[in-house]
Image (cartoon, rainbow, N blue to C red):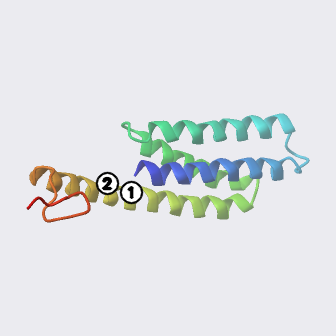
Amino acid sequence: MRMLCSSTLLGEFFVIGFAGLVAMKDPGLSVGTVWTVSGIAMVLCLLLCGVLTRPGGVQLGWALQLALIASGFFVPTMFFMGAVFTALWWASVHYGRKIDEAKARFAALHAEQGGQSQGSGPGDLGTA
C-alpha cells in the first residue's frame, strides 16, 4: 500500500506546485500567501510518504485530499484535480491493502513450505 499511496502523494506534490503558479495570477491573492499555503501542502505530501504505515497516516492522507478539493475555491480547476486525486487515493489505499494481503499470504505459504522450492528450477543442479 505504501508504494501506491506514495506515488499518489508525489503526483499531488507536483499538482499543488502547478496550482500555486496558477493562483499567483489571481490579483486577489498575495504571492506570499499562495506560496506559503502551497509550500506547506507540498511539504505535507512528502512527509505523509514517510508516515503512511503509522497509525493515522492514511487518515491524514484523506484530510489532505479534502484540502485539495477545498482549494478549488481559490483555483477552480482544483475541484476537478482534487476529485481525480481523491479517486486515485482511494484506489491506492484499497488496492494497496489487497496487494499487501496477497504478499502476506504468499510469504506465509512460502514459510510453511520451509522456504525451499518444490521441484527443479534454475537453482537446482540435480545430482545423480
128 lies left or right of 60: left
x and y, in percent, of residue 10 in the image: 60, 49
x and y, in percent, of residue 108 in the image: 16, 52
> According to the image, label 2 marks what residue?
100
x and y, in percent, of residue 8 in the image: 55, 54
Type of amino acid under label 1: Gly
In the displayed orientation, state which residue is furthest to the right: 27
> According to the image, label 1 marks what residue?
96
Residue at x 51%, y 48% (from the top left corner): 6
Residue at x 51%, y 41% (from the top left corner): 49
x and y, in percent, of residue 110 in the image: 17, 54
Query: Disc 2 vs disc 1: Cβ atoms closer than 8 Å?
Result: yes
66 lies left or right of 24: left
68 lies left or right of 20: left
| SS state under label 2 | helix
In what quadrant of the picture does the C terminus appear?
A: bottom left
Type of amino acid under label 2: Asp
- For label 2, the crowd category at 10 Å Cα-Cα, with few meaning under 14, some 14 to 19 and many 20 or more, is few
Residue at x 19%, y 58% (from the top left corner): 125
Q: Which mark is residue 21?
A: none
14 lies left or right of 6: right
